Image (cartoon, rainbow, N blue to C red):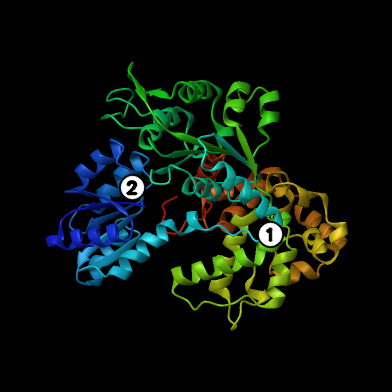
Amino acid sequence: MRLMIIGRLEGHISAAGKIAIQRGAKVTHCEDIEQAMGALRNGKGADVAMVDVKQKIDDFVKMLEDERFHLPVVACGIGTDAQTAVRAIKAGAKEYVPLPPDAELIAAILEAVTEESNAMIAGDPAMQDVVKLADKIAPSEATVLITGESGTGKEVMSSYIHRKSKRSDGVFIALNCAAIPDNLLESELFGHEKGAFTGATGRRIGKFEEADGGTLLLDEISEMHPLLQAKLLRALQEREITRVGSNDSVKVNVRIIATSNRNLEESVNKGEFREDLYFRLNVVNIRLPALRERKGDIIALAQFFADKYADQNGVEKKKIAPETSEILRNHTWRGNIRELENTMHRAILMSMEDEIEPAAVHIEGKMAGTAASASAPTQAPSSGGVSGASTANTQQTKPADTASTAQSAAPHSGDQAIIENLVGRSIADVERDMIINTLDHCLGNRTHAANILGISIRTLRNKLNLYKDDGIEVPEAAGNKG
């Protein structure tokens, strides 16, 4: 955990830093937002920033966005003035913390940032075998390729391997290759010098240098352009990088973990992915099973997410009712753990009973064929065996009203209803509804929606921009401008 503290606040914010250090965090203290941005550009990364409300938080958030630093901001101020807190939140802060600091409150903030990456639920035999393999190879320096469908927890497994490795005292840096435009990804990886390109107002350290001595996760590496793949291969072989706009090489000591939701062997055969890079990455391969292949973990994961979002939203924790557990176990979960997480987030907010009841579980895009698999597993539709990418065009056209009504429909009548809803509509209209419904299901999270739909984040953003231009309302992520 890396905490960046920005400002002074009469010494109170330093006290917050001491509390954080006692809780195991590594703390960087900056006088103001300009110094903070300089530290970030020079590789002093952070997982969360605590900022004095007297600083220009809105300017700081804008600079973070412009320079693609994904850093949650927590505002701090003396006292509990409501107007001050509201201004800080409107400026872009995720939370407001009153000072002098409360030790438990500081601990809760740190825990909230690290909680998800530390969660590893693996009670099902299929998952236990995977964890045993991860435990065996974690202490080595071998490059690891983690494969599996979207939403199976590849980043969580990557973090787990890092914590079990000899580099656990170093940093764990994650970079989503699919979320960054091709012309910027090279700079994100290797850094750049001042004036290297338009907008490069100063030197910036890339992820390789930031992760020096630790682990670098290259998430969805299959999305990387072939030209950049060649530069990545050289960095892995030579253990050195060259910043954009520089001729000088920089030695780096980084362990690489890569993930992909695609079959990279097929990508190699199609000429979309370099064969030499594939073999370089695939020293150890860990395949994560789809959620439908580890049904023994579904309820434990569901309860974990229900408790997590109960805490986040300040509502009472609830157990999952037996009949609800049956629904959850029998769903095919095309979006895997990510879909289950979003489902339980909604369920804990909508539940009206002492236990989470079936009516609170709204599974978007659930069609009759999925419900049929619950009552007659041997007759499950063939679409249940693939990721959401290939079936989204039919399953996301119209969300089910409730889980119970979706289950009660017979397979043939459900298929007929879907066909009737499609007749007379253009492909563009169906695609638009599918994308909007999926994004709404993911609570506005663009990356999650793109993974479920099986398209790149860039394609999704282009589609959404077109919809906005046509005056169509697009779901926004909570606390995010999209």
The residue that disc 1 covers is: 124
Q: Is residue 72 above or below residue 167?
A: below
Residue 398 appears in the picture as rendered: no
> Is 287 or 380 nearer to us in this picture?
287
Residue 338 appears in the picture as rendered: yes
> Is 107 or 246 nearer to us in this picture?
107
Circle 1 crowding by C-alpha within 10 Å: few under 14, some 14–19, many from 20: some
Going by the numbered disc 1, the residue's amino acid type is Asp
Going by the numbered disc 2, the residue's amino acid type is Ala
- SS type, badge 2: loop
Give the side of residue 227 with respect to residue 422, left or right.
left
> Is 124 or 50 nearer to us in this picture?
124
Q: Position of residue 332 (x, y in %)?
A: 73, 58
Q: Position of residue 303 (x, y in %)?
A: 59, 69
Give the side of residue 32 with respect to residue 262, left or right.
left
The residue that disc 2 covers is: 46
- Which of discs 2 and 1 lies nearer the camera? The answer is 1
Q: Residue at x 86, y 63 (%)?
A: 376
Circle 2 crowding by C-alpha within 10 Å: few under 14, some 14–19, many from 20: many
As drawn, the label of residue 304 is: none
- SS type, badge 1: loop
Distance of mark 2 from mark 1, alpha carbons?
A: 34 Å
Q: Position of residue 355 (x, y in %)?
A: 61, 80
